[in-house]
Image: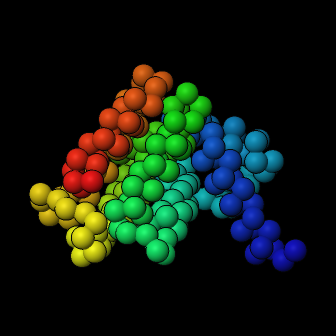
């Protein structure tokens, strides 16, 4: 295997392992040694792939959001469905994902959002860009729904998209606190109301 492919695979392995661990424990509670040990990468190799823990955190978030929005795009562009059906399929997928493991979910925006915003400006900006890309897609789908007549809103598409995303983030945090999907069900009902479905 060429060195560049091996390097890419090792870097990817470190990020994948870190994402799994940090989705459970958070950012500050996880040491680099724990990630490297689980990834099977020698300790001295970390700085070959990342210049600092901040750079590592930024790469982790960019990788996570890149995968997230790719998956989101697959859900939101399903052919033969109205914009409302596609958007509701996205929220249903969110509900299912955040209901896993006693509502501990796997969303790094939910798990790390407040924590990293105060720790690192580069990670905060990566989180801002990632969540902004999500809101952009929700807004585009709402706009498409206004055009195809499947969605009706009282405000503007951007504000509605931001309100929906914020509501679902909050519902995910409450689901973690209560270890119950009930807050997600409340968010689903409120989403239907906001979109007049």
Q: Residue furthest right?
A: 1
**In the foreground, 23 or 194:** 194
The colour style of the image is rainbow
Q: Seen in the image, is 71 located left or right of residue 118?
A: right
x and y percentages locating residue 115 in the rendered image:
40, 38
Residue 142's image quarter? bottom left
x and y percentages locating residue 10 in the rendered image:
75, 60
x and y percentages locating residue 50 in the rendered image:
60, 59
**In the foreground, 15 or 149:** 149
Res. 66 in view? no
Q: Is residue 112 above or below residue 6?
A: above
Q: Residue furthest left?
A: 154
Residue 178's image quarter? top left
Res. 21 in view? yes
Q: Quadrant of the N terminus?
A: bottom right
The number of discs equals 0
- The residue shown at (68%, 60%) is 12
Q: Seen in the image, is 99 located left or right of residue 114?
A: right
Q: Is residue 63 above or below residue 53?
A: below
- The residue shown at (76%, 75%) is 4
Residue 186's image quarter? top left
x and y percentages locating residue 35 in the rendered image:
68, 43
Q: Quadrant of the C terminus?
A: bottom left
- The residue shown at (49%, 71%) is 78
């Amino acid at each position: 295997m060429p060195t560049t492919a091996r390097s890419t695979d090792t870097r990817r392995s470190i990020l994948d392992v870190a994402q799994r661990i940090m989705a459970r424990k958070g950012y500050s509670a996880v040491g680099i040694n724990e990630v490297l040990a689980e990834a099977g990468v020698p300790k001295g190799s970390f700085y070959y792939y990342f210049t600092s823990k901040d750079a590592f955190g930024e790469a982790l978030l960019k990788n996570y959001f890149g995968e997230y929005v790719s998956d989101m795009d697959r859900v939101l562009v399903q052919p033969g469905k109205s914009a409302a059906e596609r958007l509701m399929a996205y929220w249903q997928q969110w509900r299912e994902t955040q209901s896993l493991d006693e509502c501990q979910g796997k969303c790094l925006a939910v798990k790390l959002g407040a924590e990293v915003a105060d720790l690192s400006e580069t990670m905060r900006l990566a989180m801002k860009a990632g969540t902004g890309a999500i809101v952009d897609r929700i807004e585009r789908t709402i706009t498409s729904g206004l055009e195809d007549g499947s969605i009706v809103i009282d405000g503007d598409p951007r504000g509605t998209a931001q309100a929906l995303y914020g509501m679902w983030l909050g519902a995910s945090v409450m689901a973690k606190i209560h270890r119950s999907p009930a807050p997600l069900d409340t968010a689903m009902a409120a989403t239907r109301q906001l979109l007049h479905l």
